[in-house]
Image: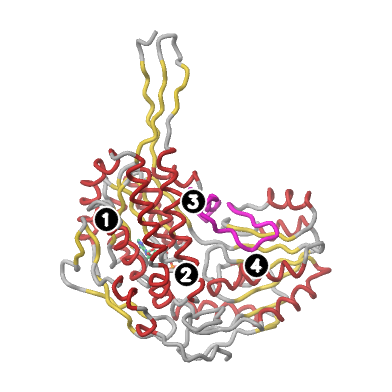
Amino acid sequence: MSSVLSTAPTGLAALPPGARQLLRDSCLIDGRWQAALDGRTFAVDDPATGATIGRVPLMGAAEADAAVAAAGRAQQLWARRTAKDRAAVLDRWAAALRERRADLAAILTLEQGKPLAEASAEIEYAASFLTFFAAEAPRITGEIIPGHRPDARIMVLRQAAGVAACITPWNFPAAMVTRKAAPALAAGCTVVLKPAEQTPLTALAVAALGELSGLPAGTLNVITGDAPAIGRVWCDHPAVRVLSFTGSTEVGKLLAERGARTVKRLSLELGGNAAFLVFADADLDAAVEGAVLSKFRHSGQTCVCTNRFLVEDSVAEEFTARFAERIATLRVGNGFHEGTDVGPLIDDDAVAKVTGHLSDAVGRGAALLAGGETEPGSRFVTPALVGGVTADMRVMTEETFGPLAAVARFGSEQEALALANNTRSGLAGYLWTRDLARSWRVSEGLEVGMVGVNTGFLSVETAPFGGVKESGLGREGSRHGIEEFLDLKYLCLGGIG
Ligand code: ADP
């Protein structure tokens, strides 16, 4: 198995001194860094080596409840501050993230595995949500509607919804924290947040910088621990008004069901099964570059990563051959090693899923054209390509979430759309064509929340991120992202005029 040779330090030794200062082994509740009530902790691993790199509190229902109580106490005071005041705190937090970018990126790579350059890009992406929503805070305006009687006027306020509970995934340990917390705090909500158990250190470091930037006690509470126990408390607690979750469709559905008992507002970013359509008139070189970006960025572990490559018959062979050549140039290695393109997968289950999808496809007649190698106990899998894929294979029906590209063919635009839409997910889709009319038709026909036309990259703080069908509810980022945390209140004024 190929891997980048380097003598660069890894593990805790790879952390710059500044990064060590940002490591936390306790959680933030009500402005105080605290251990679990019963003192229990759990280990955090470096996915590249499997070595333990730290321990964080194993909190549960009691701490989840205490966090909501703190957020509830802080909320009115925070919401009553001027929008400009709230924005100033978020701006300082963004500046702190940018100033400590190298330190945060190192923590992120250490616990998550992605190449350091990608981790560094994620820290900037995380800061961008703070900057964007700081600017959005003073734009939370209302409406005046002509009265239904001569002496009446109707006014609409947009007010903070209350306490927002946020549950974040391991694939973007920094950016998913700010993508939720920034609009919530800008709106005047307070936050209780639980990061994924695989990547708590980045979230705690980001929270520590938020505290240093002037977030008042209780406005941002971050706890780590028993996900189902914490999730149950936050779903059931009447003071939690918004539940914002990014993760698997399975857990999203559980939270939606449980949250319905207290009629929570839900913002759900769930799994995808993105199709990448290459038409015969596409710029194939650009399409191959887009394919590499959308499939192998972060080892294929993003919810907008392409899962299914669908290529028009007449160019399928050429596209696949060029894609295979390009894949062979990708270097697999530790995220701290310079030149690494593809880091480790997050855990053993992730490796098992990729190898399971690969053997299922090959077992049903697909051709293995590149990669797919791994070693027992290793979380590294070389970027893989399979051709001759058919609709019944697991690579087509399930989200692989790893570095395995599967190519199937289509004969017509209608067939391409039918194949692409043959899934209960609807997060992202991509298409490559030089035909303007087709780019509109296909974009409009794809049952997804986001479409990349001649691009393999979609994630930016200024655009609404989210899905349709079973990929979720609501949008994050853009001016729409703040709506998840605002309630409309209408005032009917009588006796006027
Ligand atoms: P993945 O399979 O990608 O790890 P999950 O949906 O399991 O995705 O995890 C996403 C987030 O949801 C993580 O923070 C995880 O701890 C949390 N989580 C997992 N199960 C539950 C649950 N039953 N209730 C609340 N949160 C959960």
**Considering the image in quadrants, where does the C terminus appear?**
top left
Q: Residues within 10 Å of mark 1 (few under 14, many from 20)?
A: many
Q: CA separation, marks 2 and 4?
A: 28 Å
Q: CA separation, marks 1 and 4?
A: 38 Å
Bounds of the magenta segment: 449-476
Badge 1 is on which residue? Answer: 233
Mark found first going from the N terminus, 1 or 4: 1
List x then y, in percent, for residue 66. 20, 56
Task: Report the image quarter containing ligand 1.
Answer: bottom left
Q: As shown in the figure, which amino acid type bears the numbered disc 3?
A: Gly
Q: As shown in the figure, which amino acid type bears the numbered disc 4?
A: Arg
Q: Are marks 1 and 2 in contact (CB under 8 Å)?
A: no
- The circle on residue 120 is 2
- The circle on residue 308 is 4
Q: CA separation, marks 3 and 2?
A: 19 Å
Residue at coordinates 45% horizontally, 89% vertically from top-left? 377
Q: Residues within 10 Å of mark 4 (few under 14, many from 20)?
A: many
List x then y, in percent, for residue 56. 27, 72
Q: Under tag 1, what secondary structure?
A: helix
Above or below residue 365? Residue 169 is: above
Left or right of residue 470, residue 308 in this image: right
**Is the residue at mark 1 in contact range of ligand 1, meaning its CB lies under 8 Å from it?**
no
Q: Nearer the viewer, residue 9 or 192?
A: 9
Badge 3 is on which residue? Answer: 477
Q: Are marks 1 and 4 in contact (CB under 8 Å)?
A: no
